[in-house]
Structures are given as structure tokens and as C-alpha cells.
């Protein structure tokens, strides 16, 4: 009897090529569970998935887990959908509201606050997005994912975290990577690799099949997926992750 792996992945625009590949794979039957990044980690840690696209910040904390593919959600330049927005320069920010959906972006923001912006803000946990733009003048807001598109141009300052990281490290960044528990067969991980390759090679078809066609017939989505997102987990991104992990920064926003 064939083993059907349980796979959890992110439910954002930046993953639709992966999801397309998984849905159209010839030799990989899988139960697919889509969720925000933080919930993907929860699904994996609590045993609801054997394979996961996980926030990179979570990986060092896991045991019996391996990175298994040459793919990721990464950026060489501007990622566009991981940003800190504010109405004052970042050096004057006193509080940062942190999007609850991404552990990697929270820790990366902490890294940049210490090593680039040289600030020690109060870190606040944001679950109600009504606070965005309605806080104090010296507040900033870390936003990730599709919701960022709706806030573009609404603040005086916007800091793309992939650009900010690259300016001080000269490296790209990987926000999420594919992992599996030790013991998942090579046959399954090899088929996963092939499915992801198929999806990335058919990005336009993935958009056509998705909810992201929109009024512009998918042009905005295609531009984002081909200009802002880099799906290849290459040696430079591995170096970036090691640098990020070795920094050991742990930001824990408090509930307000």
C-alpha cells in the first residue's frame, strides 16, 4: 500500500507555483494542508504533517528534521511582502507591532534593529490589523504576505527586510525552506523535488489556476513571482541562513 505523505505549506501568493506542482504531480499523491507560516510550523511540530514549508527561523529548533529540497521562498533583492512601515524614520521608532503570521520575519526584524537600525524598540504582538496606521506617531508595523499589497503607499517610510538584510550582509535571504522528518523516504522527497520543479517552471499556469488572476489578468502576480521571489535554495542562501541562525536573536513580542 502506497504511503500518502501529509504536506503543509504557506497559503500566500508566493507559494502558488509550489502548490500547483504538488497538485499536478504525476507520481506524488499527498494530503496538502495550507496555512499561514506560523501555523505551518505548528502543523509540523504537532505531527499533522510529515513534510512542511517552514519559516526558516524555526528550523534550528527542530530535532529529527532535514532540509530536503533545493527550493525555498527567498529573495535576492526586494521581496516586497516582508516590510516594516512607519510614518517616522526607523531610527525614531519606539514601538514595532509584529505580524503574528511569521516567526522568521519577526526574528529578522530583531536582527536588523540591532545590527542596522541600532534601535531598541518595544516589541508588540499584532493580531488585530486595525491597529495598522492607528497607533502612535512613533509606531512601526511589520507586515508580511499578501496583506502588504493593500498598505503600499500608505506610509511615509517602508523598509523591505530583504533589502535591509542584503545591505549589511551582501547576501540574499531565504524566508522559508522545505523540511521533512527523518525517515521520510527518498522516493517521496525525490518526487517532491520534481513536483516543485514542475510548479516553478509553470508559474504562469499556476496563476491562471489560482485566485490571483485579478482585474489585470495576472500581470501583477506574475511580476511579483518572477521579480521579487527567488525559489532556488542555493549556496548563498544557505550561507545567509547560517549567519541568521548563528546570530541567535530571539524577539518575543508581548501582547498589548
Image (cartoon, helix red, strand yellow):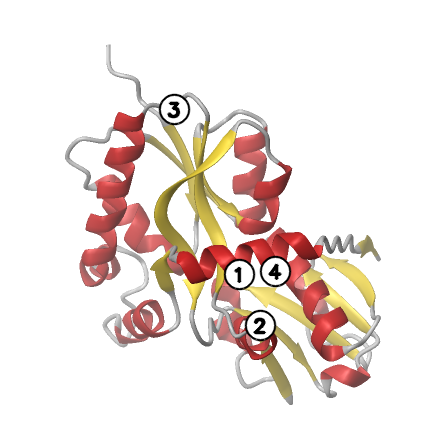
Tell which tag, 4 or 2, sits nearer the viewer: 2
Q: Residue furthest top?
A: 1
Q: Secondary structure at mark 2?
A: helix
Q: Residue furthest left?
A: 26
**As drawn, 44 above or below 253:** above
CA neighbours of label 1 inside 10 A, class few (<14), some (14 to 19), many (20+): some
Q: Secondary structure at mark 3?
A: loop
Position of residue 86 measured from the top left corner of the image (x, y, whole percent)? 69, 81
Q: Are marks 1 and 2 in contact (CB under 8 Å)?
A: yes
Residue 169's disc is 2
Position of residue 203 measured from the top left corner of the image (x, y, whole percent)? 23, 60
Residue drawn 54% across and 55% down? 241
Name the quarter where the N terminus is drawn. Answer: top left
How far apart, in angstroms, are the residues tagged by discs 4 and 2? 16 Å
Residue drawn 22% across and 42% down? 194
User: Relative to residue 186, is residue 60 drawn left or right?
Assistant: right
CA neighbours of label 4 inside 10 A, class few (<14), some (14 to 19), many (20+): many
Residue 105's disc is 4
Residue ID for mark 1: 240
Residue ID for mark 3: 184
Amino acid at each position: 500500500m502506497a504511503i500518502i505523505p501529509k504536506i503543509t505549506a504557506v497559503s500566500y501568493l508566493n507559494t502558488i507555483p509550489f502548490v500547483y506542482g504538488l497538485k499536478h504531480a504525476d507520481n506524488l499523491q499527498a494530503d496538502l494542508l495550507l496555512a499561514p507560516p506560523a501555523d505551518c510550523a505548528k502543523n509540523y511540530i504537532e505531527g499533522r504533517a510529515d513534510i512542511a514549508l517552514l519559516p526558516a527561523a524555526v528550523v534550528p529548533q527542530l530535532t529529527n528534521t532535514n532540509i530536503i529540497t533545493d527550493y525555498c521562498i527567498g529573495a535576492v533583492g526586494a521581496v516586497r511582502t516582508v516590510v516594516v512601515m512607519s510614518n517616522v524614520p526607523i531610527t525614531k521608532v519606539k514601538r514595532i507591532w509584529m505580524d503574528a503570521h511569521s516567526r522568521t520575519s519577526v526574528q529578522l526584524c530583531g536582527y536588523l534593529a540591532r545590527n542596522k537600525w541600532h534601535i531598541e524598540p518595544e516589541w508588540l504582538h499584532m493580531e488585530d490589523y486595525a491597529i495598522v496606521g492607528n497607533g502612535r506617531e512613533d509606531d512601526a508595523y511589520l507586515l508580511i504576505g499578501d496583506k502588504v499589497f493593500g498598505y503600499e503607499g500608505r506610509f511615509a517610510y517602508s523598509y523591505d527586510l530583504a533589502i535591509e538584510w542584503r545591505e549589511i550582509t551582501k547576501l540574499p535571504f531565504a524566508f522559508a525552506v522545505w523540511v521533512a522528518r527523518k525517515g521520510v523516504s527518498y522516493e517521496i522527497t525525490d518526487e517532491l523535488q520534481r513536483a516543485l520543479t514542475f510548479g516553478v517552471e509553470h508559474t504562469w499556469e499556476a496563476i491562471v489556476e489560482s485566485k490571483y488572476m485579478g482585474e489585470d489578468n495576472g500581470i501583477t502576480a506574475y511580476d511579483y513571482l518572477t521579480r521579487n521571489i527567488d525559489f532556488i535554495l542555493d549556496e548563498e542562501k544557505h550561507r545567509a541562513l547560517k549567519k541568521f541562525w548563528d546570530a541567535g536573536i530571539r524577539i518575543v513580542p508581548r501582547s498589548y
